[in-house]
Image (cartoon, rainbow, N blue to C red):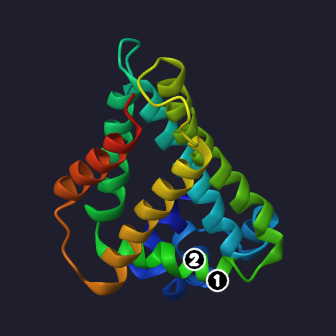
Amino acid sequence: MDSAERLFSKKGFNGTSMNDIVKESGLSKGAIYGHFESKERLFLSIRERMTVVGLTQARQMFSPEETAVDKLHKVAEITMASSCDCPREMGMMELEFMVAASRMKSLEPDMQKRYETIYTFIREIFEEGIKNGEFKEDLDSEALTSILFAALDGLGVHYATLGIEFDARRLQDTMVKVVLEGILA
């Protein structure tokens, strides 16, 4: 997986072949296919690993005395850094994968599971804010989580495909401000 991740980072998803991964890893094609049915499955496994590591790190960054507002700021900072402060090639690679994987029904359950893991993480912060009285009681945490998720993904797509340089910090601060203005109790 480490060899494949290095190659994907250098050559992109479409530019990396299984033969490249075999050569880079020193493993046989059979050994790789024994663990991963396709390049897409291998890439998805790398993404899942990154998600688990990222969410674990995010949770460790939260201190017990932090509010839901504080946590939203941190989530926005982490997400913007991974979307707009990384090389454009990383975003392009992600987009290439998403297009290819969307055509593979066998990957849908795992892609949905990854989405649900991240979605639940963000939604829990909104729910915590409602419970603690920080956010409005009638907040639709499901809808807000979906909107926030889509906005962050959209910024990542724009950054990767349009060559636009974003001031990630300004976008992050504006997004959090707009969201908070609508939900604070």
Is the residue 124 above or below the residue 163 in the image?
Answer: above
Q: Which residue is drawn at 41% across and 24% down?
A: 134
Give the labeled residue for mark 1: 100
Q: What element carries label 2?
A: helix
**Residue 82 in picture, x, y percent from top left:** 35, 56
Give the labeled residue for mark 2: 97
183 sits to left or right of 121? left
Dot 1, crowdedness within 10 Å: few (<14), some or many (≥20)? few
Closest to the observer, 168 or 179: 179
Q: Residue at x 38, y 69 (%)?
A: 156
143 sits to left or right of 152? right
Closest to the observer, 148 or 158: 148
**Residue 152 in picture, x, y percent from top left:** 41, 60
Dot 2, crowdedness within 10 Å: few (<14), some or many (≥20)? some
Q: Residue at x 31, y 75 (%)?
A: 159
Q: What residue type is labelled 2?
A: Phe
Is the residue 106 above or below the residue 64 in the image?
Answer: below
**Residue 4 in picture, x, y percent from top left:** 54, 68
Where's the C terminus, which quadrant? top left
Where's the N terminus, which quadrant? bottom right
